[in-house]
Amino acid sequence: MKVIMDAVRATADKINRLEIRGARNIAIAAIKAIEELSKETKAKSKEEFMKELMAAKEILFASRATEPLMRNAIRWLIGQTERSGEADIIKLKEAVSKASQHFLKILEESKERIAEIGSRRIRGGTTVLTHCHSSTVTYMLRKAKEAGKSFEVFCTETRPFLQGRITARELVEAGIKTTLIVDSAARFFMNKIDMVIVGADAITSEGNVINKIGTSMIALAAKEARTPFYVVSELLKFDPATMYGE
């Protein structure tokens, strides 16, 4: 079991060290880690099999405090496996694989749908401000570019880990005119911005959004300047723990 769990721990370590970034990418990595565990397990009974899945869940949960998308994905995957009613190990492995592929399909479909809806909001000549790095936001902006729209994006560098530089690099590679600014300059440039678009780490039970530190500061500056502020996210980022004040 230790050797099998080492692969799960390796994924958790990459998440913890920010080698894997972005809620969607983290969820995908976690799902694949559990699917791989289920394929390699030497468990002889359903009880032992489920025990290993639960152990993997705890390791992955501990890798990042605020990753409800990953947590929801893992909970759903394990729940689907448990509810499959299967007792045979081979059938249980198939149940994990089927659930994993289904959730990955949901993630892909949601990304495409968000990009389809969001890219319509961006018109030619628009100037967009982003904060931190969201693979969904950058994908949406790339889709708008592919649709033939010409626009400019300002990216905050997003200290201390500079995720905004990742956003800027991806947008430049997509042929989008991009300007990287320091976080404290967001308010200074706001009068030049037509819309702010950010991702989300979590959605609370009250409908609030939790995102990278600095997001609320930018939201207040946008409100002051009467600049539209959009959050791009799946509802899969809803965090049920917030119903209990956590």
Image (cartoon, rainbow, N blue to C red):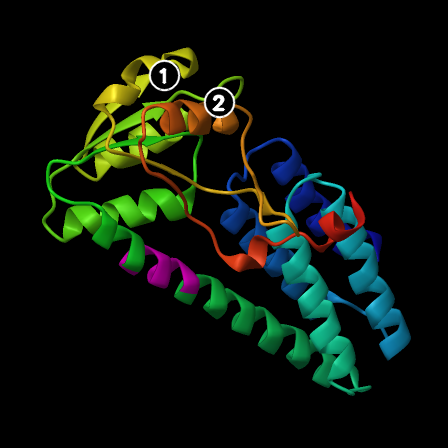
Of the numbered discs in the image, which one, if any, rests on residue 227?
A: none
Kind of residue indicated by mark 1: Arg
Image quarter in which the N terminus is found:
bottom right
- Name the residue nearer the viewer: 180 or 172: 180
Q: Which residue is mark 2?
A: 217
Give the secondary structure at mark 2: helix
- Name the residue nearer the viewer: 184 or 27: 184
Tell me if residue 161 comes above or below residue 15 in the rendering: above
Q: Position of residue 116 (x, y in %)?
A: 28, 59
Q: Which residue is mark 1?
A: 187
Q: Main secondary structure of the magenta part?
A: helix
Q: Position of residue 163 (x, y in %)?
A: 45, 27
Image quarter in which the C terminus is found:
top right
- In this picture, residue 212 sits left or right of residue 6: left
User: Residue at 32% across / 24% down in the picture?
Assistant: 225
Q: Position of residue 12 (x, y in %)?
A: 68, 43
Cα separation between marks 1 and 2 = 9 Å
Tell me if residue 51 comes above or below residue 212 in the rendering: below
Classify residue 130 by image quadrant: top left
Q: Which residues lie in the magenta part?
A: 110-116
Tell me if residue 17 comes above or below residue 78 in the rendering: above
- In this picture, residue 149 sits left or right of residue 69: left
Contact? badges 1 and 2 (CB < 8 Å): yes
User: Residue at 66% across / 41% down in the picture?
Assistant: 66
Residue 112 colored in magenta in the image:
yes
Q: Position of residue 180 (x, y in %)?
A: 30, 20
Which tag, 1 or 2, sits closer to the chain's start? Answer: 1
Kind of residue indicated by mark 2: Met
